[in-house]
Amino acid sequence: SNSDFGLIGLAVMGQNLVLNVESRGFQVSVYNRTTSVTEEFVSAHPDKKLVGAKSLEEFVQSLAAPRKVMIMVKAGGPVDAVIEQLIPLLDKGDIIIDGGNSLYTDTERRDKWLGDLGFRFIGAGVSGGEEGARKGPSIMPGGPASTWDVMKPIFESIAAKVDGEPCVTHIGPGGAGHYVKMIHNGIEYGDMQLICEAYNIFKAAGFDAEELAEVFTEWNEGDLESYLIQITSKIFAQQDPETGKALVDYILDTAGQKGTGKWTIMNAVENAVVISTINAAVEARILSSMKDKRVEASKVLEGPKPKIDEKKKKLVKKVHDALFASKIISYAQGLDLIATMGKEKNWGLDLGKIAAIWRGGCIIRARFLNDITDAYRKNPELSNLMLAPYFTDLLNEFQENWREVVSIATLAGIPVPAFSASLGYYDSYRSAVLPANLLQAQRDFFGAHTYERTDKPRGEFFHTEWPEVIG
Ligand code: 6PG
């Protein structure tokens, strides 16, 4: 019993995490439900300090106390099933870590369940895909601070590093880690959709895949530098071996999703926080998946020809500004939701630390997360990212081109739901006066809901006897 760490679930993420932990000098025990997977994995790495267990009993016995067991299985029922099997085998004080994309309320339930039994539980968001898992992910652990202290050396050694700082921090108690990972994913959806809308505009302006690869490569060398922009440039450069043409043109336009985006929206509605960019991104995936209906509708519902006549170079600059501005809005909304929920749950979240651990390892890593980190380090109570002076300046600079891009696209019948939702949020947020005076009148008209007046102190409510409507 001398393994420092154990991992259950040897799918690609699990395997890569194991190799990452082992590479930092730890001995790792592994267990997979299908034993042949365990055997193949261990024998494929004969020079590594790995212990392959055929049974859970053997696995648990191979671990040094207090045992540290990470579960990397499908979110939902499978996590509970593994925990139930582990409970009779573990000792009090042993640590179970769930590293999947679990719903944070499930994590809160498990936190209580296992805590009551005397075990220690950490629900940890792990981002970075297969490569991140192997070389250094961004990790968002929740659970008790005292458990974090025990796990800190391993987590810090396997996490990505930015300026020497590991991309992991104790997010907060209970489900806080998985919650923050959920919002990370919502933001990831937003970033991806915004990039897709930029692509759609460029397509209508006649850019071919080679030109697109160039644009994205160039963007990745500037202020938009990010993992998702980088992989997008590589995607455009990828040829289909069958046809020798751009692979992207052969990929069917129906997007899947596993749930974290939808959960983010549901939580935003519950907290009355506007995350319209992320909403638009989730809904865009839903609309994309309705391929047959779209094909039918395309035959009868009219619109302009999706053609944009703009000088390519100028268009690239305009779309850059629209994309960057929308991206700022998306992060402003996601962070607003985190801040709101953090207060609601008393999690004591530190947004500067959260932004800092997203600078490396995770899917949304981006140069501008440095500026977000700075903004929150300067002002931890920042009410909205748009109001940090650095971002206010950027938005003021970008807003004209942003409007133009939304207009150009709209006039050409190209859907830009995330660009326009972001712009709608920006314009609403900066409107000292909105038309909700009329809305209040309507509410008072049909339901006597009362209203406040512009010429009277807030908190005084009025009702009007509106004329009767007949028929
Ligand atoms: C990450 C990713 C990863 C995965 C999600 C989203 O941070 O590494 O977010 O966790 O991509 O499961 O997947 P869907 O797009 O299928 O919802």
Image (cartoon, rainbow, N blue to C red):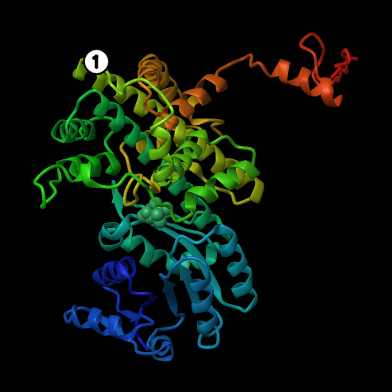
Establish if 202 lies above or below 225. Answer: above
Query: Residue 340, located in which quarter of the rendered image?
Result: top right
Rendered-image quadrant of the N terminus? bottom left
Could you say which is closer to the camera, residue 442 or residue 66?
A: 442
Residue 188 showing in the rendered view: no
Can you name the residue that lies furthest to the front here?
Answer: 300
Residue 433 showing in the rendered view: yes
- Give the image location of residue 261, x and y in percent: 48, 48
Q: Which residue is mark 1?
A: 310
State the residue at coordinates (15%, 30%): 211
362 relative to 453 in the view: left or right: left
Establish if 49 lies above or below 351. Answer: below
Establish if 265 lies above or below 258. Answer: above
Query: Residue 227, located in which quarter of the rendered image?
Result: top left
Mark 1 lies within 8 Å of ligand 1 (Cβ measured): no
State the residue at coordinates (21%, 42%): 249
Can you name the residue that lies furthest to the right here?
Answer: 465
